[in-house]
Amino acid sequence: MATALDELVVVDLSTEFFTGVAAALLADFGARVIRVENTGVPAPLPNRDGMRPAEKLDAHAELANRNKQSVALDLETEDGLAVLKKLVAKCDVLITDLPFEEQDAKGLDYDSLCALRSDIILARGSGFGPNGPDRDLPAIDELAASRVGLMSTLGEPGQPPVYSGTGQMHTAVMLAFGALMALVHREKSGEGQVVDTSLFAGNMYAASLDLQAYLAVRADRILEPVSRLDMGNPMSGPSYPCSDGRWVTLAMPDTDRWWPVFSEIMGLDIDDPRFDTHDKRCGDNRLEMMQLLDELFVKQPGSHWEAKFAEKKMSADLIETYDYPANCDQASVNRYVLDLDHPSHGKFQSLGFPIMMSDNPARLRSMAPCRGQHTEEVLEDFLGLESD
């Protein structure tokens, strides 16, 4: 079966996870992605942030580098740069997150790339965008997230901000999407161009539901961390503890449509004078209602409430941990999670493919390669050079 991106050649000159994932998304749909790894600098260490437990394999590298070929070049030498430029001359897209200054110093700025191939697409992942006073700040997700305001929404009042890490994946998808849009334009016009997607923009879109509302209305409460018991609508937003330690989250507008069914499930009197209007439930008696819901939810296990709300088709569900998608048939059958067998480390699971195409599905053709695993093959067969 043909893949969607047959014949597309991408050179992946990434150092950060999000740019590597952008290239991997193209590889999943059939692009030939040649990852160039610079032997002139130390290899990155796995789990560098110290937040994850020790792994038998570098799981993040397996995701970011699957379906790729790896070529090892010393890009601190003229010979290594010369080979890289030969690769670029034969590719459709160069994906990189190198700082602007380093791109210029290595002759990888857009004008220089056009001398190698006039219709090249330069897809660049940056920290804060191609323009402005912060254009040269490093492409590090925590720095971008701290600027956006997203982190401040994730903690309790008086507690330190929480880093969610969602901005990287938004940025990765947008970078791959931008490269494809540029390729569509090239098909029509014959022209290449620069595509820049920043972690700053990716984190802003990760927070878009709240950030867009703030930009529109400038309400003081939007994007400010609030206590669980300080939510405006007891039926939408708060989560309630169950008897087995699990939590139920609710997402129901407080309207006459939802209140009768919700009150029935919870065993509340629909005509209780404390809660018989929207203004009472979400205004004067809001805290009293939430305290009552706390007392009711904690009397039953999560499975009880899950069944009750599902029966009435109400917008509520249990809050799951990572073991849920890891063992979920829904995630498996849609290939959102893959069960794999690594040749060196044995069985493991990995994130799969977030996009489903009925006629040209994504495929896992190969695991992440070892550093330089395909140097000889690419130099000899693709470039016609003799490898050392």
Image: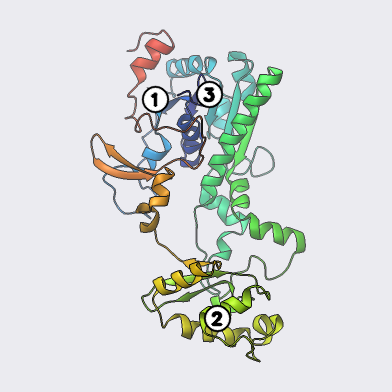
Residue 160 placed where, x, y %?
51, 68
Vertical comparison of 9 with 266: above or below = above
Mark 3 or 1, nearer chain start: 1
Secondary element type, mark 1: strand
Mark 2 or mark 1: which comes first in sequence? 1
What secondary structure is found at the residue carrying circle 3?
loop
Q: Residue at x 59, y 85 (%)?
A: 287
Instruction: State how far apart marks 3 and 2 are (Cα).
Output: 68 Å
Task: Left or right? Give the position of 327 relative to 83.
Answer: left
Does residue 234 show up? no
Q: Nearer the viewer, residue 209 or 161?
A: 209
Type of the residue with mark 2: Glu
Disc 3 residue type (three-letter): Lys
Q: Is 128 placed left or right of 141 in the picture? A: right
Q: Are marks 2 and 1 in contact (CB under 8 Å)?
A: no
Residue 246 % position (x, y): 40, 72
How would you rate the neighbour count of disc 2 (Cα within 10 Å): few for under 14, some for 14-19, many for 20 or more?
A: few
Q: Which mark is residue 69?
A: 1
Furthest-right residue in view?
217
Q: Quadrant of residue 247?
A: bottom left
Q: Which residue is mark 2?
A: 264
277 above or below 382? Answer: below
Circle 1: residue type: Gln
Q: Which mark is drawn over residue 106?
A: 3
